[in-house]
Image: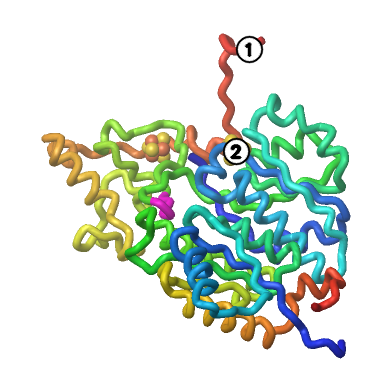
Amino acid sequence: MIIAQRKPLEEIKEMVASYEKVLVLGCGTCVAVCFAGGEKEAKLLASELRMARQMEGKSTQIIDHTIQRQCEWEFIDPIKELVASVDAVVSTACGIGVQGMAERFEDKPIFPGVNTTFLGMPVQPGEFVERCQACGDCILDLTGGVCPVARCAKSLMNGPCGGSQNGKCEVNPETPCAWQLIYDRLAKLGQLERMMEIMPAKNWSTSRDGGLRKIIREDLKL
Amino acid sequence: MSETPFEPEITAFVCQYCGDMAADSAGWNRISYPANVKIVRLPCTGKVDVHHILNAFEHGADGVYVVACPEGNCHHINGNLSAKRRVTYAKSLLDEVGVGGNRLEMFHVTAAQGDEFARIAAEMTERIRALGPSPVRRAMGKSSG
Ligand code: SF4
Ligand code: SF4
């Protein structure tokens, strides 16, 4: 899922300082599951903003609402009237949701309430870790199901580097070395010979380097 | 400055198995505690949500505290530990807002400890009295008392 983190209150307060009526709009999918911008978090942020503004003697017309997803028109469109009734929106969805809202409501200021941080998973309650960088050409079949793009600090295709020590990464001794993980997993799979194969340079044109990415599926078009 | 001394409004979220029964114990034993404390009974302090805590402050509470069973003794195994973590998180939000995390506290009692329940109520009332009205309540323009 997409993992995000709430922005500091001070930053959000600043963004909406000149607007009277503000809607805090939560998103009920990825950011709800990582507890950054779901229904509860939108309520908390709205409550924090109301208190902070009350203490500054400002308008406290801050309401909250949550839709299932802010990255699909069918969920955005039904709240047209609600959005029309406020001066600005703080979206606690990921950057995709914020842009979806901004595209749909061109004349309404839409502000990001969270920092979209990475694609990952909760490895245990309260701990979220990056797993994929959406490189557009998945090689997990070659690396024992461990991603060297996202999990190796240097995104090495032929690791480990000389800094791998006791299974840890030299960039951060708390992070497991991705190539150690790959080695261990390949060993379990009985595929250690893969470590001897030289992986050719990866074609990054499918990743960010090729500019904006787009997928067209004629079969899904209306 | 107002002539009448400031009487804090305090909300206590209590578990029905310990905090609430301790409040009863205080009653049976004729132990009085400050009337400033308004009790919200919960099936377990594991039910305390950060939002409930902020809500109390938003609506004018000067202080809030949570009374749970002693650690290792929760009727629902670890609801009190969840509450403890949430109280810590709520304190950080209250600091962020400028209300002050020290207006919120977590306590543990057993059902029989009526005296301890009363002592906690007195301690929190004193703490909040010393801190003065919450900045939110002050901004609401509510009179103190
Ligand atoms: S807007 Fe972002 S957080 Fe919400 S569902 Fe879509 S991708 Fe997930
Ligand atoms: S190889 Fe690419 S697509 Fe596959 S997990 Fe890694 S970053 Fe994601």
Camera sees residue B45: no
Left or right, A188 with respect to A93, comes to left
Dot 1 falls on a residue whose secondary structure is loop
Q: Position of residue A195 (x, y in %)?
A: 18, 41
User: Circle 2 is placed at which residue position?
Assistant: A28
The reply to whether callout 1 and callout 2 are in contact (CB within 8 Å) is no
Indicate the quadrant containing the C terminus of chain A: top left, top right, bottom left or bottom right.
top right
Q: Position of residue B20 (x, y in %)?
A: 51, 64
User: Circle 1 is placed at which residue position?
Assistant: A221
| Tag nearer the camera, 1 or 2 | 2
What segment is highlighted magenta in the picture? A125-129
Q: Residue at horizontal 70%, vertical 35%?
A: A100
Above/below status of B13 relative to B103: above
Depth order, front residue of A159/B76: B76
Q: Position of residue A32 (x, y in %)?
A: 56, 43
Tag 2: residue type? Gly
Depth order, front residue of B10/A203: B10
